[in-house]
Amino acid sequence: MRPGAAADPQTDREPPPDGPAHAPLPAGTVVDLAAVRREAGIDDVLATLDRELVGLTPVKTRIAEIAALLLVDRTRQRFGITTPQPTLHMSFTGNPGTGKTTVALRMADLLHRLGYLRKGHLVTVTRDDLVGQYVGHTAPKTKDVIKRAMGGVLFIDEAYYLYKAENERDYGGEAIEILLQVMESNRDDLVVVLAGYADRMDTFFAANPGMQSRIAHHITFPDYTVDELEEISVLMTETLGYRFSPEAREVLRRYLDKRIGQPWFANARSVRNAVERARLRQARRLLEQPDPRVDLAALTTIEPPDLLASRVFESVPEDPLAESGIDSTSGALTR
Ligand SMILES: Nc1ncnc2c1ncn2[C@@H]1O[C@H](COP(=O)(O)OP(=O)(O)O)[C@@H](O)[C@H]1O
Ligand SMILES: [Mg+2]
C-alpha cells in the first residue's frame, strides 16, 4: 500500500509519500471496515462492474477478493503492521470479445481508488509498441512504454508474440527482460496485465518461467453462453437508447444461436457489431417506409427485419454443409 496515495480520512491531508504516515493506532482501536470501503469508493466500482458486465462471475469474484485484500492491508498498516505490497501482475486469458480489455480498465480504476496505483490509467500495447526492428531500438521503445504506464496498468495484448521460440535472435526477448525487471522493482507503481488466448499464453509461460513467477493472478475469461450474449445485446441496445420489440427479441435469440457457431465469432464483440448493424438497418427501414412519419417508439425500436437481413440467416437450415459452417465465404463476411 502506498501511504502517499490516499488522503487520510482523519486528518484530511496527504501523508508523506514514504514511511509511516503517523503513529500506529493502539492495538485496542476498532476500525469500521464498512467506512473504509465507503471512503475508498470501491463499492461504486464493484457495483458498476456487476451491473454493466454480464456474467463473468469468477472474474468479478477475483476482483472483489483483490479489493478486500488491499483494504485489509491498508487497515493493517494503520496499526503499524507492514507487509510488503502484494504483487498484482495478472494474466487475462480468453477468446476475443470476452471482456479482457474492459475489465482491465475497471481494474485500473479500482486499484487507483484503493491507493495501490497513483494514477490508475490504462496503457494498451502489443508487441509492435515494445519491440523494435533493429538492434538498439527495443530497449528505448519498451522503456518509453513503461514510462507512460507508470502509476497505472500496462496491458500487453497477445503478450505471447513477444517471444518467438523459433528465433533466438528476436528482439522480443530484450523487451521481456526489461519488463521482468520493472515488474519486480516497480511493482508498487505498475501493474502489468498480459492478455491473450489461453493456450498460447500457457506456451509462453512454459518458455518464460520468470514471467510466470511474477504473475500473481491468472484470470480466465470464459466464452459467453447464448443467454449471456442475449443479455449483453439487450444491455448494449439500452445503453444506446434502443430496445428490441418482443418479436425482434426472438429473432435475436435465433441470430445468436446461429452466430455462435460460425467462423469469426468473437463473443461480446460480435454482439456489438450485430447491434450496430441492426441500428443501420433500422434507420434505413424508417427512411424507406411508405409513411415517413415516426414517433419515439419507432425511433427506438429494433424490429425483426433489422436482424433478419443479416447474412447469418442466409444459410438454409436444412443444408448440413451450411450449418456446419463449411461455407467459409459467407462465414467470413457474416457478422
Ligand atoms: N460481460 C460483458 N457485458 C457487457 N458487455 C461486454 C461484456 N464483455 C465484453 N463486453 C463488450 O464487448 C466488447 C468487447 O470487449 P473487450 O473488453 O474489448 O474484449 P477483449 O478485450 O476480451 O477482446 C466491448 O464493447 C465490451 O464493452
Ligand atoms: Mg481486448
Image (spheres, rainbow, N blue to C red):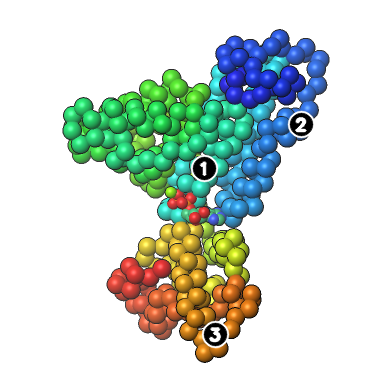
The residue lying toward the viewer, choosing from 329 and 36, is 36
Q: Work out which quarter of the rendered image holds the N terminus and state it.
A: top right
The mark that comes first in sequence, 1 or 2, is: 2
Secondary-structure class at tag 2: helix
The mark that comes first in sequence, 3 or 1, is: 1
The tag on residue 35 is 2
Residue depicted at x 18% and y 33%: 134
Q: Position of residue 166 (x, y in %)?
A: 20, 39
Q: Is residue 257 shown to the viewer in this render? A: no
Q: Is residue 29 left or right of residue 76?
A: right
Q: Is residue 16 shown to the viewer in this render? A: yes
Q: Are marks 1 and 2 in contact (CB under 8 Å)?
A: no
The residue lying toward the viewer, choosing from 266 and 292, is 292
Q: Position of residue 165 (x, y in %)?
A: 24, 37
Residue depicted at x 42% and y 26%: 183
Could you tell me how far apart the alpha carbons at marks 1 and 2 are, in whole angstroms? Answer: 25 Å
Q: Position of residue 59 (x, y in %)?
A: 56, 45
Ligand 1 within 8 Å, label 2 CB: no
For label 1, the residue is 105
Q: Where 105 sits versus 277, above or below?
A: above
For label 3, the residue is 292
Q: Is residue 104 left or right of residue 156?
A: right
Q: Work out which quarter of the rendered image holds the C terminus and state it.
A: bottom left
Could you tell me how far apart the alpha carbons at marks 3 and 1 are, in whole angstroms? Answer: 43 Å
Secondary-structure class at tag 3: loop
The residue lying toward the viewer, choosing from 320 and 24, is 24
Please name the amino acid that badge 2 sits on. Ala
Please name the amino acid that badge 3 sits on. Pro
